[in-house]
Amino acid sequence: MTAALLTVESLSKRFRGLKAVSNLSFTVPEGRILALIGPNGAGKTTSFNLIAGVFPPDEGSVTLKGQRLTGLKPNQVCAAGIGRTFQIVKPFGQLTVEENVMVGALARERSVEVARRQARALLERLELADAAQRPARSLTLPDRKRLEVARALATRPTLLLLDEVLAGLRPTEVDRMVAVLRDLNRREGITILMIEHVMRAVMALSDHVVVLDHGEKIADGTPSEVVSDPRVIESYLGAEEA
Amino acid sequence: MTNRGASPVGIALLGGGNAGAATGRGAALLALGGVTLLLAPLVADRYLLSVLTTVLWFAYVGQAWNVMMGFSGLLSLGHALYVGLGAYASAALFVHFGVGPWAGALLAMLVAVVAGCGIGFLGFRFGVKGVHFALLTIAFAEVARVGFDHIHWLGGSGGFFLPVEAGVSDPLNLRGSPLLFYYVILALTGAALLLARSLLHSRLGYQWLAVREDAEAAEAVGVDLFTARMTAVAVSSALTALGGVFQAFYFNNLFPEQVFSMGRSIEIILPAIVGGIGTLIGPILGAFILTPLGEGLTFLLEVSGLELPGLKQLFYGVALVVIVVFRPDGVWPWLARRLGLVRTSAEGEDAR
């Protein structure tokens, strides 16, 4: 059992009385891939935003390798070592693809030229090198998703938060992205926490799955354990097939 | 290496955005423009020189305003405040304490930075965004306009005057002929262009652009929004205040109703809007389009005897509408692409 990189403890968040996340606890072991699944509105993205510091939790705490992140701003969470993507992609539209990734690299790098080199290497890796000099707003959705990943990776995170980066991709594109993510995890030891609906990818990639429903954790286990859990089938998997 | 590094004078003519480097033609044209302006006094008469000085002043201040709006996405509609503070601070130091404008400019810039950062603090600390931030900037400029009317130490509403001695040429105290002022504002405009360019290509500049494009995403990749925005305000207000110092010593008189006026704030933002917000050449080109048109109009009105108050404002309004409708990105990006002055990326593939 490896040590926990990220520890989420009794996290709760209410929006105008509506419990978006309630009493959520889980850990992401170092070097692993953990998937957060659940039906729409289950509180997955809210959990991400709580971890990334977009807003503070009402209760609970988030720690990364012993460092308490609760109450930090998003840029401080990034500095602590968490890179994130956005479910609704947020490219810097008028900047080139390369400049988008450079901004990420500049989080840890003072030299613009070094940042540019790092950005190019990442674009190569995410198969975006050909689009490097194009404005980001001209990219197709699959490419924008790749750009989100490249920009987050450029901040050199120890933990990568991926919010539905496979949604809307074609099966072949899903396979390529899965290969890239697996490679990042195996070769560079980047720990990944992903929100994902594409179950095929969840099964193929994750070591561990946490299932949310109505803001609460209803299951927590290996992918095969989770997909055979009656509560999960009822609230999420079954609903999808219906 | 890519084409970006290949051009020795690779000036990004389109700031950020399609940050295309200048083509050889673009760089040559820019150099030609610079040389023309340097040699202009050889042929220009007094009137033309004064028009060019006005053009360059707006180009300079437009460049300063652009650092906030164009680079960082912060809409200021009260830049007259920084002009006025710079002008009054340097004039007061000169008149009351005998401090020369170059030394006084430092303090004048400091005063404007303090004011700018105060407004910035209120805005950014309390999440005042977009149009509401713009309203905040207007409010402070208006407060200054009314307030300075009552500061008798600075002449109040009756105006504050700098001593003028005919025939004196003292560049160290910014006293001298129109020719001196022309070259001073030309140098300032050139320096502001170079400064804006190097800022845009710096770490800070990329962070500004990221904040402008999407603040939430910028924050997620480690940009401290508050610091990034405050530095933009500081740079912009300091540069603008220097424009105010120039104005004080060029015109030798200051009236709160003029220097702090809403109209002046609008005049400051128009060159960048017309030329192209967020571009380096835009504010300069915009000033060269607007000021001569305004002068021409004034001339025509005088000749025809049609002295209608507010007609010039109407003209600016119409010019703005025409630009916003036909060239919403400004004249420069379109012109640069048309004439092949910048290297374009695969912009043509842009689906929109």
Image (tube, helix red, strand yellow):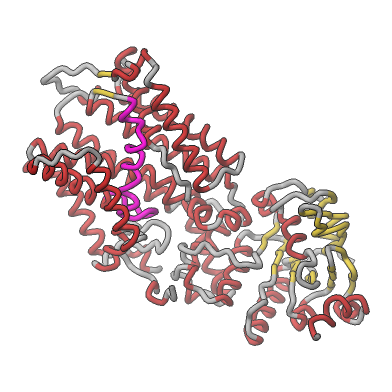
To which quarter of the image does residue B188 belong?
top left
Most extreme residue toward the right is: A230
Residue at the spot x=49%, y=68% of the render?
Answer: A136
Quadrant the C terminus of chain B occupies: bottom left
Q: Residue at x 35, y 69 (%)?
A: B344
Classify B225 as above or below B145.
below
- Which quadrant of the figure contains the N terminus of chain B? bottom left
Indicate the position of residue A44 as horizontal and vertical percent values: 77, 65
Determine if residue B181 is in view.
Answer: yes
Residue B13 visible in the snapshot: no
> Residue at left 56%, top 77%?
A127
| Residue B266 drawn in magenta | yes
Main SS category, magenta section: helix
Query: Residue B289 or B22: which is nearer the viewer?
Result: B289
Magenta-highlighted residues: B256-284
Total residue callouts: 0
- Left or right, residue A123 beside residue B175: right
The one of A71 and A232 positioned closer to us in this rendering: A232
- Residue A119: percent from the left, percent from the top? 54, 65
Residue at coordinates 30% horizontally, 64% vertically from top-left? Answer: B334
x and y, in percent, of residue B71 in the image: 44, 51
Against B9, residue B99 (above or below) is above
- Relative to the observer, which residue lies in front, A97 or B226? B226
Residue B26: image quadrant is bottom left
Instruction: Give residue B275's position: percent from left, percent from top.
Output: 30, 54
